[in-house]
Image (tube, grey):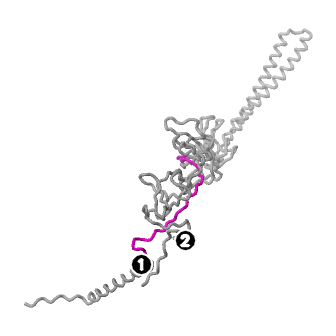
Amino acid sequence: MSANPRPQQPLSSRLALPALAVSLVLLSACSGKEQGAGGPPAGGMPPMPVTAVEMQPTRAETSVEAVAQTEGAREVEVRARVGGILMKRVYEEGATVKAGQTLFQIDREPLDVAVAQARAQLAEAKAKVEQTQREAARLKALLAQQAISQREYDTATSDNSVAQAAVQAAQAALRQAELNLSYANVTAPVSGVTGRAQVSEGTLVASGAGTLLTTIVQVNPIWVRFSVSDTELANASPDGRFNPKAIRGVELVLPDGSTYAQRGRLNFAASQIDPKLGTLQFRGEFPNPDGKLLPGQFVKARLITGEREGVFKVPQAAVMQTDGGPVVMTVGPENKVAPRPVKTGQWSGKEWVILGGLKAGDKVIVDNLIKLRPGATVAPHGPGEGPGAGGKPGAAPAAAPAKG
């Protein structure tokens, strides 16, 4: 039997094999020429361009942060000072009112009647005084003529004194009635933002603490309450000891992460530490003219405890957290990457405050950190400069143009 003929390859496959071999030869030749013309050395990749910031000692404020809550500088309950039927509410709920502005009106008619009665009683008491005075004067003349006894004259004088006391009592009763009439208009005791009305028109309200009508909260200025542990206070103080007189102010960090535009002042610091929580209570006061801060809002309070000198500031991204603590990458001799353990303080804006581990003149790498390895050669350049700018040592050589 004759052997089966070998299957013939397609014409396209037979032509592709020589073409592929020629391409590999040309590519190898081009690569060799490019390396010889200034490509990467045979030992590995070129130095990686990195941005390095030269350290210079500076000063930074020391602070400690705590969760805080805002509250009105004054939170007042508005209650009626006289009883009666609530006739009208004359303010808009939730609106800002001024001290002395009328909020509610109570029925005036019973109060008008009480004023009229007090005036009538005062007039009657004054008439009684006039009568007793005339009687005392008449008896005094008779006593001089020894027509009456001393006892009769003393009795008339005593009646006059009683009548005068009755006048004073009537005057006080009239004053009280007039005050009650003025209390028919329930006014705002302080300026601030009103709450919702707790009672509606037609309700019989009691005087004093019996019936709550509404509330008023003063929001300018606004207060912020917070507590800080004694350990945090000691760590945040420059000399390791908290001194209330050294407090420079209070800053607010809003829920969106932004810092409140105006710095506040500390208007209260507790004199003793809470034995159950180990914290010290504080209260800050902030101007709030536009009402941006509302009572009951949760924020962060940053207590400025003092100032440290001789510290360094590096961008937050330059500090890496490791099992051994925070580390920064520096440019060592011969542009080699040198890890440096550091001691960090608080944040200052977008920068870390470095308390130890760096010295003046150190160059801290702030980018491409994930690609770096200790001992690797880098090409450092300053912030805002391009790789290799300014002819700095270690700059990456310019790549030769590729040849086709």
> Which residue type does callout 1 highlight?
Gln
In the foreground, 342 or 280: 342
Quadrant of the frame with the N terminus:
bottom left
Quadrant of the frame with the C terminus:
bottom left
Position of 58 with respect to 44 (left or right) is right
- On screen, residue 235 above or below 17: above
Name the residue located 68 percent from the left edge and 46 percent from the top edge. Answer: 98
Q: Is residue 179 visible?
A: yes
- Would you say the residues marked 2 and 1 are in contact, meaning their CB atoms lie under 8 Å apart? no
Q: Quadrant of residue 118?
A: top right
Which structural element holds mark 2?
Answer: helix
Question: What stretch of residues is rendered in magenta?
Answer: 39-68
In the foreground, 167 or 194: 194
> Which residue type does callout 2 highlight?
Gly
Question: Residue 168 in the image: x percent, y percent?
Answer: 77, 26
Q: Which mark, by number, is residue 35?
A: 1
Q: Is residue 345 magenta?
A: no
Residue hosting label 2: 391
Magenta stretch, main secondary structure class = strand
Q: Is residue 64 magenta?
A: yes
Question: Residue 171 in the image: x percent, y percent?
Answer: 77, 29
Q: Residue furthest left?
A: 1
Name the residue located 54 percent from the left edge and 69 percent from the top edge. Answer: 392
Position of 164 with respect to 272 (left or right) is right
Local crowd size for mark 2, using a 10 Å CA cut-off: few (<14), some (14–19), many (≥20): few
- On screen, residue 12 above or below 82: below
